[in-house]
Image: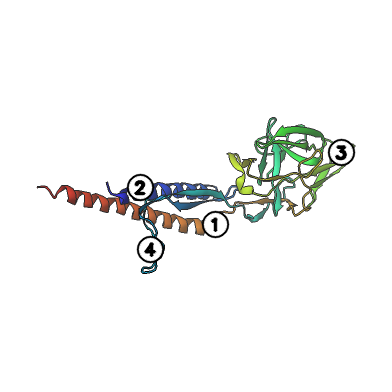
Amino acid sequence: MLRSMYAGISGMKNFQTKLDVIGNNIANVNTSGFKKGRVTFQDMLSQTNAGAQAPTAGRGGINPKQVGLGSQTGSIDNIHTQGFLQTTNNPLDIAIEGDGFFAVFNGETINYTRSGNFYLDQDGFIVDANGNFLLGTAGNELVNADDGAGPVSGYKMRIPTDAQSFSIGDDGSINVVGSNDNTVLNIGISSFSNPSGLEKVGGNLYLDTQNAGHNVAGGNVSFFTPGSAGIGSLVSGTLEMSNVDLAEEFTEMITAQRAFQANTRIITTSDEILQELVNLKR
């Protein structure tokens, strides 16, 4: 069989993957805190017909003769650029301006998110849309859990039920007015040297991995104070939206579609050549 046919098949599979990633990006164009994906390709192993030869006294050197065998998926990256901030005027809608992630606790593990739409449950704890507790550097209850790559500890934060109002500063501090509870509350931010190494687990959440490079603040708390040590600051009353650019995604979709069609044409042409070979004996 012709090698070009298998090269075309590999190209079709790769561009199907690229279209899947583009479709997911477009589907999440309005998902708060979503980070778009990107597919990169690599060439596959090449078949060597003749190796390179060094020059001699009477002849120059000869380059290798190789035929490529197609392409393969090199990586599927998450692009962690800043999304634009949408004003909501809800004090529990919190955006991170800069690097870092919120940490949330589901009772067993700690996950990370850029989606800052939080709420108060009936006991006054700050939770996300899935009921996970928002963690910080100071709060009401210390929890110790695993985040997928090792032990992490942080504090749950509870707004007293007798509080009249509260506000959240850009350093994560929560100022409660009209309560007899003097507990210090401070939202913490997790930092990773390689945020693309985080694993998506759905629900706008990420799980730490061995390649994410979790930066530990030290002590009993594994989170940084927002605005310190190069970590992003918080903006209360706003939400970070998706960083998906529709114009870019539609352009990439057209490119992937045409590339897919070109690879199908390779298979069609290879099939016609095989048909001519079969028709030689008549």
Query: Which badge, 1 or 4, is on the more N-terminal residue?
Result: 4
Q: Is residue 47 visible?
A: yes
Q: Residues within 10 Å of mark 4 (few under 14, many from 20)?
A: few
Q: Mark 1 or mark 3, which has the lower sequence index?
A: 3
Name which residue type carries label 1.
Asp
Could you tell whether 203 is left or right of 9 in the image?
Answer: right
**Residue 197 vs residue 39: left or right?**
right
Give SS at disc 1. loop
Could you tell me if residue 33 is visible in this image? no
Q: CA distance from mark 3 to mark 2?
A: 62 Å
Q: Which mark is residue 62?
A: 4
Circles 4, 3 touching at the beta carbon (< 8 Å) = no
| Sooner in the amino-acid sequence: mark 1 or mark 2 | 2
| Horizontal side, residue 192 vs residue 31: left or right | right
Task: Name the residue located 46 percent from the left edge and 48 percent from the top edge.
Answer: 73
Residue 187 % position (x, y) = 77, 44
Q: Which mark is residue 260?
A: none
- Tell which residue pokes out farthest to the front in this image: 57
Identify the image quadrant of residue 131.
top right
Give the label on residue 183, or none: 3
Instruction: Give me the disc on residue 9.
Output: 2
Within 10 Å of the Cα at label 1, are there few (<14), some (14-19), or many (20+) other Cα atoms?
A: few
Which residue appears at 75% of the width and 47% of the height? 91
For marks 4 and 3, the one nearer the N-term is 4
Instruction: From the image, state whether disc 1 or disc 2 is nearer to you.
Output: 2
Seen from the viewer's position, the closer of residues 61 and 225 is: 61
Residue 105, how many percent across, how many down? Answer: 70, 35
Element class at badge 4: loop
Q: Amino acid at mark 3?
A: Thr
Q: Could you tell me how far apart the alpha carbons at marks 1 and 2 are, in whole angstroms?
A: 30 Å
Residue 162 vs 14, above or below: the answer is above
Of residues 211 and 28, the one nearer the viewer is 211
